[in-house]
Image (cartoon, helix red, strand yellow):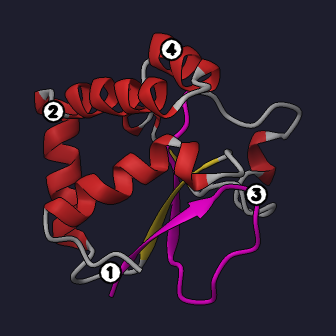
Amino acid sequence: MTVRIVRLGTPRHRQEGTRIGAVRRPPRGVRKERYAKDDWFDVWYPELSPSTDLVSRALAAQTDAEWKNFARAFRAEMNEPMPRRTLDLLAALSHDAHFSIGCYCENEGRCHRSVLRALLAERGARVA
């Protein structure tokens, strides 16, 4: 059993399980009933995405230093009680179930899902 970190809107892996959309907003121009059918997500969970202000910082990050500042700020947001408990829960579930967490960004290295991957791994999650 594992958690996969994925790009939303891409074809699913055959053992991916439930796909969680860790994005601030649902996909534009896609009807709600198409989210799962078109491989966006099964469950929208914006609490695993950066705040609106941090999304802007991430999108504007041009240098490694700017990206590291974003990642540090996002880690601080994810260390608040509710997100921290959610990450702990997901890490535990990864030992018994297949599921995935994703975002729209093309480059995972410059996407908050890379930080989520690290945070889950730090909690002992089984990450594919």
Q: Which residue is mark 1?
A: 97
Count residues near mark 1 (Cα–Cα under 10 Å), then give few for <14, some for 14-19, many for 20+.
some
Separation of residues labelled 2 and 1 (CA atoms)? 24 Å
Separation of residues labelled 4 and 3 (CA atoms)? 21 Å
- Residue 122 sits above or below residue 47 on the image: below
Q: Which residues are magenta?
A: 1-24
Q: Which residue is mark 3?
A: 9
Q: Mark 4: which secondary structure?
A: helix
Q: Amino acid at mark 4?
A: Thr
Separation of residues labelled 2 and 3 (CA atoms)? 28 Å
Task: Tell me which numbered mark, 2 or 3, is placed earlier along the sequence.
Answer: 3
Q: Amino acid at mark 3?
A: Gly
- Residue 9 sits above or below residue 56 on the image: below
Q: Residue 1 vs residue 41: left or right?
A: left
Separation of residues labelled 2 and 4 (CA atoms)? 17 Å
The answer to the question of whether label 1 and label 4 lie on touching residues, with beta carbons closer than 8 A, is no
Q: Mark 3: which secondary structure?
A: loop
